[in-house]
Amino acid sequence: MINNKKILAIIPARGGSKRLPRKNILPLAGKPLIQWTIEAALNSKYLDTVMVSTDCSEIASISKSSGADIPFIRSAVLANDVASSIDVVLDTIFFYEANSEEFDYIILLQPTSPLRTSQDIDSAIEMLIEKSASGIISVTECEHSPLWCNTLPDTLSFNDFISKDLMSKRSQDLATYYRLNGAIYLVESAHVKNFNNFFPRENVFSYIMDKSHSVDIDDEFDFQLAELLVENVKSL
């Protein structure tokens, strides 16, 4: 708790994963992927409850052993390919409210961001309080400027791929761009219930995370990158 505000951490982890089967419990440097996020959340100074929403008994067992709450098993309707994160969060909020427990803020921590730390979580929460914000969303610097990107026609012609005013500029002279990294979505519970999203139109701020903390695991390449980063830290 911070400033008498209760915060619920929701870690969504369904059993199905097409690109990387059993992704949420694959071993990353000796620990199931989801355990990295659970441990970071439990080590936060400010989170009141850390729960995992899952439809999978194996994920539930691992999560419980790692210290997370598993107050219910997610329904199959909210575990298919078309179910959205917001539906999962609302399902969780309403479950707790039905059991006479309410939270001021919700923080969504996806298990596919295993290198996000407890310090990242606490810094985002502290920013929320310092700015009296409605929400904090984590971002990281883009690996490459989007100004060097474009679509290609069927002919693969490179004509007009880059605008003429950029031809003479060096990449380091371009403005710095940031992207969502999927690691932290922190928002007022009331906003989620009233607007069915994590993005308040006003009074929302960006928490900038280091690139090395921002790996978002979607496929085997991302997983290997995360393993490499973890091993590099261990060797220091």
Image (cartoon, rainbow, N blue to C red):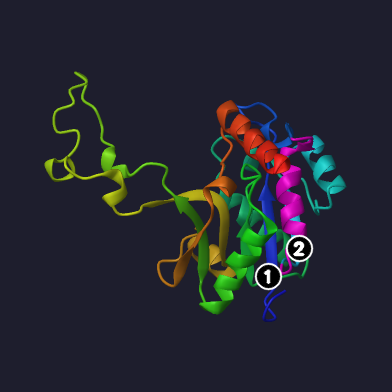
Q: Residue 41 in the image: x percent, y percent?
A: 72, 57
Q: Residue 49 in the image: x percent, y percent?
A: 76, 63
* Front residue (pair 7, 124): 124
Q: Give the CA distance from mark 2 to mark 1.
A: 9 Å
In this rendering, which labeled residue sits more in front, label 2 or label 1? 2
Q: Is residue 43 magenta?
A: yes
* Front residue (pair 42, 71): 42
* Front residue (pair 15, 135): 135
Q: At label 1, which amino acid type do we have?
A: Phe
Most distant residue in the bottom direction: 3
Residue depicted at 84% across the width and 48% down the height: 64
Classify the position of the C terminus by image quarter.
top right
Q: Name the residue under label 2.
A: 49
Q: Quadrant of the rendered structure where residue 74 is?
A: top right
Position of residue 211 relative to residue 220, above or below, is: below
* Residue at disc 2, secondary structure: strand
Q: Quadrant of the rendered structure where residue 171 is?
A: top left
Q: Quadrant of the rendered structure where residue 167 is?
A: top left
**19 lies left or right of 22:** left
Residue depicted at 65% across the width and 66% down the height: 122
Classify the position of the N terminus by image quarter.
bottom right
Residue depicted at 84% across the width and 52% down the height: 67
Q: Mark 1 points at which residue?
A: 103
Per the rendered image, the range of residues in magenta is 29-46
| Mark 1 surroundings: few (<14), some (14-19) or many (≥20) residues within 10 A | some
Q: At label 2, which amino acid type do we have?
A: Thr
Pick whichever of labels 2 and 1 is earlier in the sequence.
2
Residue depicted at 76% across the width and 52% down the height: 39
Q: Residue 83 in the image: x percent, y percent?
A: 57, 42
Look at the numbered discs 2 and 1 and tell me whether their residues touch, using CB distance below 8 Å.
Answer: yes
Most distant residue in the right direction: 65
Q: Does the magenta stretch include residue 93?
A: no
